[in-house]
Image (tube, helix red, strand yellow):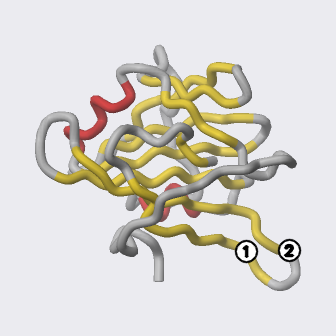
Amino acid sequence: MLPWPLPQGWLVSGFAGAGDERTGIRGFVFALSGPNPLGGPADLLIVAEEPGVGLGAGLAGLPGPDPGDGFASGQPNATVTVANHDAPLWLVDSTETAVFAGEVAGSWVWVLLWPDTAGVMLFDPLPLRDLRAPGQELDVPFGALSPRLPA
């Protein structure tokens, strides 16, 4: 999942996959960097993964492979739009990071923003493109590698 069109002034700053030789890639993360709407720089990670992989939870600093107890118990806090369908996201308890998670087409979708004030980017639905769909012809601008990606 890649935000598209990219927010004004944002660049893709890397990507990574999670999986093994036996099962293949089961989770993927795109890193982006750009201006925080409230001032200064910001980083954004978009994670799409099969349930149980734990990539999004690990990047959010959570102890387990999912958002944890009490997740999605109230009203959603944000929305992403994928293939013209809105998908709700809920705020996940984290420190110094705005973390949102939800489900899209059977996959966990995580949105992580640093600093947490950059979470204001989700006041309006964030449009995401599923790059697994055929026929993607995107001219993606790249910047310097993000330090937020796993090694």
**Which residue type does callout 2 highlight?**
Thr
Q: Quick check: 48 left or right of 43?
A: right
Q: Amino acid at mark 1?
A: Gly
Residue 128 falls in image quadrant: top right
**Residue 113 position within the rendered picture, expressed as x and y whole percent measured from the top left:** 34, 48
| Image coords of residue 34 (percent x, y) | 30, 51
- SS at mark 1 in the image: strand
Where residue 133 appears, x then y in whole percent? Answer: 82, 46
Which of the 4 image quadrants contains residue 122?
Answer: top left
Residue identified by numbered label 1: 19
- Say left or right for 58 vs 23: left
Residue occupying the point 46% across, 65% down: 142
Name, please, the residue furthest toward the top: 75
Relative horizontal placement of residue 98, taking residue 129 as reference (left or right): left
User: Label 2, on which residue?
Assistant: 23
The disc label shown at residue 46, or none: none
Q: Position of residue 64 (x, y in %)?
A: 53, 59
- Residue 48's place in the image compared with 26, above or below, is above
| Most foreground residue, 64 or 149 | 149
